Amino acid sequence: MISGFMSRIGRNATLVDTSAHYALVDANDTHHLEAIQFAEQLSRQKVVWVVTNFIVAETYGLILLRLGRHAAFAFLERLLYSISDGTTYLVRVTSSDEERALEILRTYEDQDFSYVDATTFAVMERLNLTRAFAFEPPL
């Protein structure tokens, strides 16, 4: 599974978190310009963006809440296009990822990770992804 995944997307794939997606969409976000510049750098390097279905749902909800339906739907359409053209790879969170997420939340009880964060860490472990495009603190 992992070797097939890596052969499809390349070793320089980067997981793109909700905070990065949001910063790219909201021109008033503190990290907007930095996010644009980093996204352009990833594009020049032909890095495949990796997202989970949980990140997509979280990002859509956040944009809907803060910027409205039009902006949220535009984000979703752009993301789906990038999945169809192969520049973004969608990973579905598995039940094993969810079990691992629970272990992560128990292990790091001193951290305020969201459930989506924990599932993201689990997916990164499963796929041996070592790079993430994110801003801290989380949204």
Image (cartoon, grey):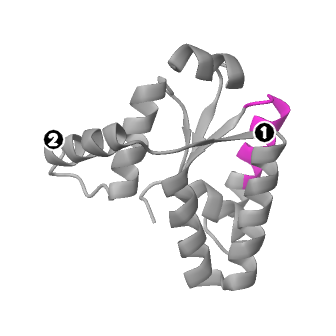
Crowding near the residue tagged with mark 2, few <14, some 14–19, many ≥20 C-alpha atoms within 10 Å: few
Between the C-alphas of marks 1 and 2, the distance is 34 Å
Q: Amino acid at mark 1?
A: Thr
Q: Amino acid at mark 2?
A: Thr
- Counting from the top left corner in percent of width and height, residue 120 is at 43, 44
- Specify the label residue 114 is tagged with: none
Q: Quadrant of the C terminus?
A: bottom left
Quick one: label 1 or label 2, which is nearer the N terminus? 1
Q: Secondary structure at mark 1?
A: loop
- Counting from the top left corner in percent of width and height, residue 138 is at 43, 59
User: Does residue 34 appear to the left or right of 95 in the view shown?
Assistant: right
80 vs 40, nearest the viewer: 80
Name the residue beneath numbered marker 1.
Answer: 87
Crowding near the residue tagged with mark 1, few <14, some 14–19, many ≥20 C-alpha atoms within 10 Å: some
> Which range is magenta?
36-47
Position of 40 relative to 137 (above/below) = above
Identify which residue is drawn at 25% across, 42% down: 99
Assign the magenta stretch its main secondary structure: helix
